Amino acid sequence: MSIAFTAAARRLGLVAAATTVALIVAYAVTLAVGFASLESPDEQIGDPMFTILEVLILALMPAMIALMVAVHAWAPARLKTLSLTSLVFTALLAAVTCGLHFVVLTLSRQEAFAGLSWLPLVLSFKWPSVVYALDILAWDVFFALAVLFAAPLFGGGRLARWIRVVLATSGVLAFGGPAGAVTGDLPLRNIGIVGYVGVFLVAAVLLGVLFRRTRPVAA
C-alpha cells in the first residue's frame, strides 16, 4: 500500500467504487431492456432507453476517474508509474466518450440536423460512423489500456490477485471492439462489451472491498 493512501483517499475510493457499481448495473439493465425491445439485431436502440444509456455513460465517467485516482493513491510507490499511466488512459477514455455522447445527446436531436443525408455517417451508432469509431477508440482501446496497466498493481493477497486477474480479463476482452471494426464483423464488439460492462463490474466490487479492508495511513 502506498503512503499516499490517506483516509480521504480511502473514502474517495469507497464512494467511487459504489457509484461505479451502481451506474454499471443500471447501464447493463437498461442495455438489456433496449436490446430486448429490438425487432432486428440491425436496429438501433431507441428512446427512452437510448437517452437513459447516454446519461448513464456521462455520469459514469467522473466515478471511474475518481476510482482510478484512488487506485493510484493505493498503489505501492514502486509501481506509481503504472498507476499513473492507467489514470491517464482513464482520463482519455472519459474525455473522448463524454465528448461524443454529449454531442449525440444534444446535436442529433436539433431540427437543424434533421434530414441531413450525412447525419448517419457522423452521429449515429450504426457502423460505419464517426461517433461509433470514436466510441470504439474510447472503450476498446483507452479503457483496455487503462485496466491492463492497472492489473499489475495488485498482488500478494488473495483479494488483490483476484483483482489483477479480473482487470486483465476485462482489458483483453475489451480489445474485441477494434477487431470487429477492422474485420467488419461488428458482433465481435459484444466481446468488448462483456469486458467493460460485465467483468469490470466485478473489478469495481472487488476494489471497493479492498479499499474497505485497507487501513489508511495517518495524516
Image: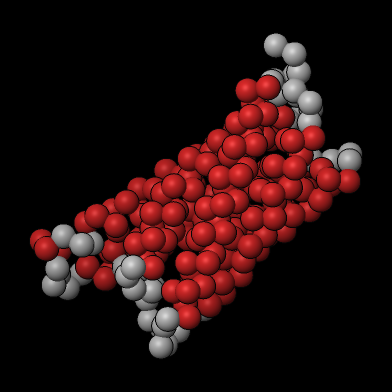
Query: If the image is split into quadrants, where does the N terminus sit?
Result: top right
Q: Residue furthest bottom?
A: 39
Above-or-below relation of 133 to 214: below
Locate residue 23, reporting x and y percent: 52, 53
Whether residue 65 can be seen here: yes
Residue 56, percent from left and from top: 44, 54
Q: Point out the residue furthest to the left here.
A: 112
> Looking at the rendering, which quadrant does residue 202 occupy?
bottom right
| Quarter of the view holding residue 171 | bottom right
The spot of residue 152 in percent (x, y) is: 77, 42
Report the quarter where the C terminus lies. Answer: top right
Q: Residue, x 16% and y 60% (percent of image)?
A: 110
Q: Residue at x 29, y 57 (%)?
A: 105
Which residue is at a point 55% across and 35% down the rendered structure image?
66
Which corner quadrant of the image does residue 197 belong to?
bottom right
| Count of all numbered marks drawn on residues in the image | 0
Q: Which residue occupies 10% across, 61% down?
A: 112
The picture places residue 15, in percent across and down from the top left corner, at 59, 37
- Answer left or right for 215 relative to 104: right
The residue closer to the viewer here, 46 or 78, is 46
In-front residue for pair 38/192: 38
Whether 196 is drawn above or below 17: the answer is: below
* Colouring used for the render: secondary structure
Res. 170 visible in picture: no
Q: Is residue 124 left or right of residue 28?
A: left
Q: Is residue 4 left or right of residue 67?
A: right
218 in relation to 76, above or below: above
Q: Is residue 213 above or below residue 122?
A: above
Between 97 and 16, the one lying in front of the other is 16
Residue sitting at the far top: 219
